[in-house]
Image (cartoon, rainbow, N blue to C red):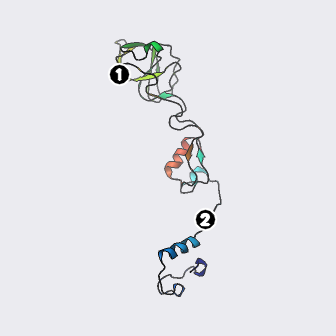
Amino acid sequence: MLKPSNLMNNQAVNCDSPVFNQSLLSADEALEFLLDASTATEKKESVSLDNSLGRILASDIHSTINVPGFDNSAMDGYAIALNDNQLLQKNLSFDIVDRIPAGSTGNELNNGCAARIFTGAPIPKGANTVIMQEECEVSEDGTQITIARAIKLNENIRPTGNDIVEDDVILSSGKQIQPQDISLASSVGVG
C-alpha cells in the first residue's frame, strides 16, 4: 500500500505515475491513504471571540446570565395585580396607577391595580399577569381599564431565564464557530 510519506510534494499523481504503478486506487485504498495522510491535533489555544470564526470549540461554552434577565412583558398592555377572588371572573375593572415603558422599572402594584406596560418592560412587584391592550377597555378619563373575559395568572409574562438559563451550555465542544455563534456568545457575556 502506498504511504503518504512516499510521495514527493510536487509529484503529479495520475495513472502514468510510477508511484501508483499505473493503476487506480480502490475506494477503500483511497480512504486509507487519506486517513494516513491526515493528522488530528489535540492542541488547544485560546483566542478572542473576534478571532474565533471557523475555529472548532475545544470545550463547551456556558451562558453567564439568564435571558431574559428579569420577568418582563411579552406585549404591550396592562400589568395587573390580581387577588385570588378575581381569578377567572369576567368584566373586572382596575385602576391605572402607573406607566412602565421598556427600560423603566415601575412601582409596586397593590391588588386591584393596573399599570400600562410595554413589551420588554420589567413586570412590577405585585403584578401577576399582563393583559394585551386590545383586550382592555379604557375609561373615558383614562384612569381605569375593564377586561370582559376571564383572566388567568401569568398571562403574557416572559419569566427570568425563559430563553437561556445562567450556566446553560449554549455552544458545545466540537462545534465549528459560525457568525451567529459569535453573536450568541457575546450576547450572554462570553468573550
Identified by mark 1, the residue type is Glu
Identified by mark 2, the residue type is Ala
Percent across and percent down for residue 147 are 36, 17
Percent across and percent down for residue 65 are 58, 37
Task: Judge by depth and name the residue closer to the eye, 37 or 51.
Answer: 37
User: Which residue is found at the position 58% from the left and 54% from the top?
Assistant: 57
Task: Judge by depth and name the residue closer to the eye, 166 or 25.
Answer: 25
Against 55, is 4 above or below?
below
Task: Judge by depth and name the residue closer to the eye, 10 or 173.
Answer: 173
Tag 2 and tag 1, C-beta contact below 8 Å: no
Against 171, is 12 above or below?
below
The residue that mark 2 highlights is 40
The residue that mark 1 highlights is 135
The kind of secondary structure element at disc 1 is helix
Percent across and percent down for residue 80 are 45, 18
User: Which residue is found at the position 52% from the left and 72% from the top?
Assistant: 31
Judge from the rendering whether residue 7 lies leftward or rightward of residue 27; answer left or right. Answer: right
Percent across and percent down for residue 93 are 39, 12
Q: Is residue 173 visible?
A: yes
Q: Quadrant of residue 92?
A: top left
The kind of secondary structure element at disc 2 is loop
Against 70, is 138 above or below?
above
